[in-house]
Structures are given as C-alpha cells and as structure tokens.
Image (cartoon, rainbow, N blue to C red):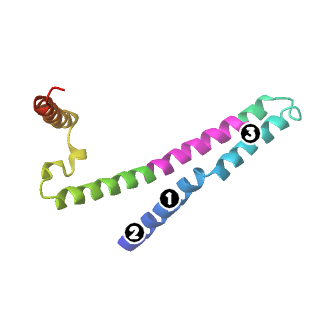
Amino acid sequence: MATNDNRSEKGFHIFATQAAYLVGTKWAFLTALLVIVLWLVSGPYFHYSDTWQLIINTGTTVVTFLVVFLIQNTQNRDARAIHLKLDEIIKSIDQAQNEMIDIEHLSDAELQTLADKYQRVREECDNRRKRTRKPA
C-alpha cells in the first residue's frame, strides 16, 4: 500500500511541477490571451448574453482555482529544498550559528527575538566602524 502512495505522491509532484512550469511560459500566456480574444470576438454572435459572460467567468475561475494549488505545491517543495540547502550550509560553516537551522519552524515572537538580536549585532558593528574611522 505504501508503494502506491509513494507512486501517486511522486506522480502528483511530477505533474504539479510540469504544470506550474507550463503555466509560466509565454505560450500559456499567449493561449490565455487567444482564448480571451476569441471570447470577445464571439460576443456579437451570442448577443453578449448572460451565458456568454458566464462561460468566461466560470472557465477562468475554475482554471485559477486549480492552478493556485499546483503552484502552491511547487512553491512549498522549492521552499523546503532551499531551507534544507541553507541548513546544510549553516551546518558546514564552523563559525555559523547552528541555532539558525530550522528557524522557519519558530513562532513569530521567537523570529522577532532573533531579528532583534541580529539588529543589535549590526548596530554594534556600525558603531565600531564609526569609532575606528579617522577624521579626514
């Protein structure tokens, strides 16, 4: 059973990645533009009826609804991969703060505490730099 779950998950990942890529191409944009132009041109034939308007409204809503989930899936995977790569870099640098690994799982308050800490470090560096500069 787990094998089928892995296959379906991998299959969805491949589908979502390819679909997100295709949706982001110029050809997808040109196709969407062509659909809109054809819809507009067909207006007089359908007497600009409510059905004519409903077709484009429904079509665009359904496509948007589905594409949002595909793109979000791809962005989630990309973000996770980037976090893992950054964690590996942090782990491999001796002077790096290992507390930075997995900080995306911290609460907003904990993230603000870290941001405040690094703000103070930056201010201290700026102050040291100002003190060590010689007047011209």
Give the percent coordinates (x, y) of residue 48: 82, 29
Upstream in the sequence, badge 1 or badge 2? 2
Residue 52, image x and y in percent? 78, 34
In this picture, residue 65 sits left or right of residue 47: left
Query: Is residue 57 highlighted in magenta?
Result: yes
Quickly name the residue at label 1: 17
Dot 1 falls on a residue whose secondary structure is helix
Residue farthest toward the right in the current orientation of the protein: 45
Q: Which residues are magenta?
A: 55-73
The Cα–Cα distance between marks 1 and 2, rounded to whole angstroms, is 16 Å
Q: Marks 3 and 2, how far apart in space?
A: 39 Å
Residue marked by disc 2: 6
Q: Quadrant of residue 78?
A: bottom left
Query: What's the residue type where badge 1 is placed?
Result: Thr
* Front residue of this view, candidates 115 and 127: 127
Q: Residues within 10 Å of mark 2 (few under 14, many from 20)?
A: few
The amino acid at mark 3 is Ile
**Labelled disc at residue 36:** 3
Q: Main secondary structure of the magenta part?
A: helix
Mark 2: amino acid: Asn
* For the residues bearing labels 3 and 2, Cβ distance under 8 angstroms: no
